[in-house]
Image (cartoon, rainbow, N blue to C red):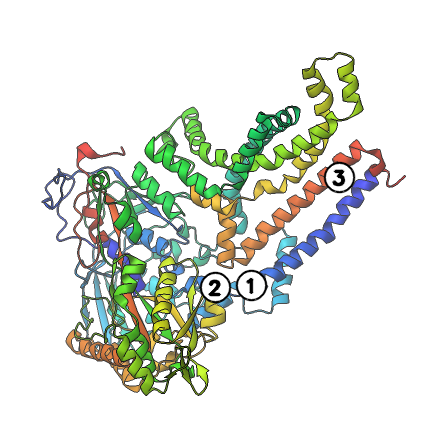
Amino acid sequence: MITYLAKRILMLIPLLFGITLITFAVIHLAPGEPVDMQISMSPKVSAEARQRIREFYGLDKPLHVQYVQWLGRMARLDFGRSFAPDNRPVTDKIAERIPITLSLNIVALILEFGLALPIGILAAVRRDTLLDKGITVFVFVGFAVPTFWLALLLMYFFGVKLGWLPISGIHSLGSDRLGPAAWFLDMMKHLVLPIGVMTFGSLAGLSRYMRSSMLEVIRQDYITTARAKGLPERTVILRHALRNALLPVITFLGFSLPGLIGGSVIFETIFAIPGMGQLFYQGVMMRDYPLIMGILVIGAFLTLIGNLLADICYSIADPRIRHGRT
Amino acid sequence: MRRWFRALLVLALAAPFLAACDGSAKPPSHLSRGPGKPACGDTLVEGTIGEPSNLIPILASDSASFDVAALVYNGLLKYDKNMNLVGDLAQSWEVSPDGLVITFHLRRGVKWHDGGDFTSRDVLYTYRVTIDPKTPTAYAEDFKQIKKAETPDPHTFRVTYGRPFAPALASWGMPILPAHLLEGKDITKSPLSRNPVGTGPYRFKEWIAGQKVVLESFHTYFEGRPFIDRYVYRIIPDPSTMYMELKAGGLDMMSLTPVQYKRQTETPEFTSRFNKYRYPSSTYVYLGYNLRNPLFTDKRVRRAITSAISKDEIIQGALLGMGQAAHGPYKPGAWQYNSTVKDFGFNPEKARTLLAEAGWKRGSDGMLVKDGRPFRFTVLTNQGNEQRLKTAQIIQQRLKKIGIDVKIRVLEWSSFITHFIDKRNFEAVILAWTITQDPDIYDVWHSTKTGPKELNFINFRNAEVDRLLEEGRRTFDREKRKKCYYRIQEILVEEQPYTFLYVPDALPVVSARFRGIEPAPAGISYNFIRWYVPKEEQVYK
C-alpha cells in the first residue's frame, strides 16, 4: 500500500510539470499582450509608454526565459504579481475570491446530491409510470433551459415584481452593521436564486445516472431473493439495492472535487458574485499571464489530488488494484 | 493626459459653494417633486460594470478607476461646467508672455485625508514619478515636454517648457498624489493603490473586491462638506441585472443603454422615481480606412463611401436616435468645434458619380469593378460592442446598394489591436476615440505618428495638417488656436481619411430623491458635492 501511494505521488511531479509547460505555451500562443488592454484606444498613449509597460512586466524577454523565470518563482511557491494595473500578488487575488466560490459550490453540490439521488431512485422504482416521465421532463427542462435566461426571469419575478429576494451580489448594503445571525440570513437570501438555478441545471446528469444504476441493481437476483423472503419493499430498496447502486455515484463525487474551485462566468456575471469564474475570465481577456497560470496550476493540482483520492478509495475497496495485477 | 478630465469633471464645483448643511443653499426649481430642503446625509449607490483596477490614477487606464479617483483626488486645474479651465488645487496661475513658464499659486490650508498638509512638494513628486522611466504609466507624454520643475516655496510651483506647449495647462488636471506617503517607495507596490489618500471631497473607506467601493464625505474639504455622506460603487457586471437592481431600488444611479432609455423607462412608475439625463458623451465613432491600401488612396473613393452612408440612419438604427452625427474629431458645441464644416450628407447618386470618376465601373452583377477586380473590403470591429456591429451592418447594406461588397469581421480586443491595428493589417475599421477637452490631436493625425504601434495607424499624411497641428500646440491664444483647428476640420472633411460617424449620447439616470442636479455642457456630475436629498426622503442612515 505504501509503495503504491509513493509511486502515485511521485507520478504527480512530472504531470504537474507537463501541465504548466503546456498551459504556458498555449496562453502565450493567444494573440495579444496585457499591454493592449491598458492602452485601449486613448490618443495619449505613445509607443514609448507601451514599451515601458512591456519592460515592466518582463514581456520583452524571450518566451523560454519568461517560462524559466516563472518556474523558478513557482518552485518558491511565488505566483508572482498580476499584470492587471493593480499589480497585486496573484495569491491575494485568488484568496479573496476562493471562499465565496467554494462555499457556493459546496452548498450547490450538497443540494444537487440531496435532490438528484432521491429523484433518481424514485424514477427507477416507479419506472415507466407517469411520475417517472414527469421527473424526466422536469430534469431535462432544467438541463436544457439556458441558465442566464432562467436567472433573469426569476430575478425579475422575485426581485422586481414581488420584492421577496435580493437580485444580485452576496450582501446588502449596510449588512456589516447587522448581528451575526441577521448577517447570515441576509447572505442566505442573496444565495437562494443563484444556488437554486445552479442546482436545477445540474439535476439531470446525476439523477439519470442514479436511475440507471438503480435499475441495474434492481434486476439482480439477490433483490428478488430479498423480496421473496418477504422483506418490505422499502427495506429492499433502501437497504439492499441502494448501497450497491451508490458505489458508482461515489466516484462521481470524486470527480466533482476540482470543479469546486471553478466558477461559472455566466452565473457570476449575472448575479454579480465576485467568484473565480469572473476572475479567470477577466484574466484571460486582459492576458494577465501570472493570474491565468496561477489559477490553472491550482486547478491542475486539485484535479490531480482528486484523482489520487479516487484511486486511493478504489484501492481500499478493491484489493486487486492495491497489489497490482495479482 | 486629457483623459483625466473626463473623470475630473465629476469633481468640479458649482458656483461659489458657500452653502453648507444648514440649508442656506438656493435649491434648483426645475424638479417635478419639489426641491425640498438641502440636508446632509444619505448614500448614493452607483452601478458600474467594471471594477476599478488601481486607485493611483497614473497607473490605471479604465474609466471605473477614474470615476472613483475623481472624487478622491484633485488636480491643479479642472474644467468647470462650461468646459473652461479653472483653478482647483491651484488658486491662480500665470503663463509667461513667451508661453514657456507656467507658475501655479497653490491653494493654502488644503489637507490630505490623513491630515497632512498639501504643498508644492506633492506637485513636484507627482510630476517626477510620472516621468520616471520605472513607472509603468501611459500618461508621461505631456510631462516630458517640461524642461524644469521648481518649488520656490511650499505654495508655488513653476514649470518651464522647452517650447510653448498649449496642452500644458490641461495636462495639470492630473490628480496630485501625496508625496509624504509615496516618496522614496515603489509606487507600483504601494498600498495606496487599494487604499488611496487624496485631497478630494470624498475619502476612501473600503473596497471589497468584486463587490463595492465605498467613499465617505470629507467634512473639511476645501470647497465645503459635500451633502451626500457616502458614495458607493456597486460592481454589477451584467447590464440587465444592473437595470433590475435599479428598478428594485438597489441602485440610485447608472448609465442606460439606448434601448432602456427609449423603450423601457417611459412608464409613469419609472419617471416618478427616476430622472433621466441625456447629453453628448466624449467619444466619436468612425469608419477608418487604411490609406496604404490601393483601394482607398483615391480621395474620391473615400468621399463616395461617406456620401453613400446615411449617418442619421445609423444613429436611428444603432442608437435609437441617442446620438448625433459627427463630421470631425471634436464634440459639437466645444470651442474648437467648427460648426460650419459639414460633410456632404447622404447622397448615393453623388457616390456613384464619384466612383465612376475614379474608374470604377458596374459589372454585370451590379457590383463595381476596376481593372478586372471587384470593389470588396472587410470592416473590422471589436467584440462586445453591439452598437458598432449594428453600425457595420447598416454600412454594409448601404454600400452594397452602390456596388461595394463589404464583409464584417468581429475580433476580440487584444488580438484586434496586436494582429490587425499594430501590424497595419486591415482594410477598414470601425472604432472610437475619446474626445479630449484640449483640442490637441497631434498623436492621431500627425505624419510622424505613423510608426509601428503609433496612433496614426491609417497612415494619414498631410503637410498642411502637420503644420497646423504643430502651430496649434505652440499657441496659447484661444482665438488663434481655434483658427488652426478650424482649418484642420475643413481638411479632414475634404480628405475623409475617416468617415466620422457619430457621437453617442451619455444616458445617466438618477433616483429622483437626489436634488441639485444641473445638467450643463460638462454633464451632470461636475457639481456632485452640491447634490442633496431632503431629510424626509433620505433612505440610508
Contact, mark 3 vs mark 1 (Cβ under 8 Å):
no
Mark 3 neighbour class, 10 Å CA radius: few under 14, some 14 to 19, many 20 or more: some
Residue furthest to the top: A230
- Chain of the residue where label 1 is placed in the rendered structure: A
The answer to whether marks 3 and 1 sit on the same chain is yes
Residue for badge 1: A30
Circles 2 and 1, Cβ within 8 Å, touching? The answer is: yes
Which of the two discs, 3 and 1, labels the residue nearer the N terminus?
1
Chain of the residue where label 3 is placed in the rendered structure: A
- Report x, y in % for residue A17: 69, 55
Q: Residue at x 30, y 74 (%)?
A: B308
Q: CA distance from mark 2 to mark 1?
A: 9 Å
Chain designation of label 2: B
In percent of the image, x 43 and y 81: which residue is there?
B293
Q: CA distance from mark 3 to mark 2?
A: 42 Å
**Helix, strand, or loop for circle 2?**
helix
Residue placed furthest toward the right: A326
| Residue corresponding to mark 3 | A311
In the figure, is residue A111 to the left or right of B343?
Answer: right
Q: Nearer the viewer, residue B98 or B32?
A: B32
Residue for badge 2: B414
Report which quarter residue B21 is drawn in. Answer: top left
Q: Is residue B434 left or right of residue A214?
A: left
Q: Amino acid at mark 3?
A: Asp
Where A236 sits versus A65, above or below? above
Q: Mark 1 falls on what kind of element? A: loop
Up/down of A207 relative to B66, above or below? above
- Coordinates of residue B431 in the picture (x, y in percent): 37, 67
Q: Amino acid at mark 2?
A: Ser
Name the residue: 22% across, 54% down: B278
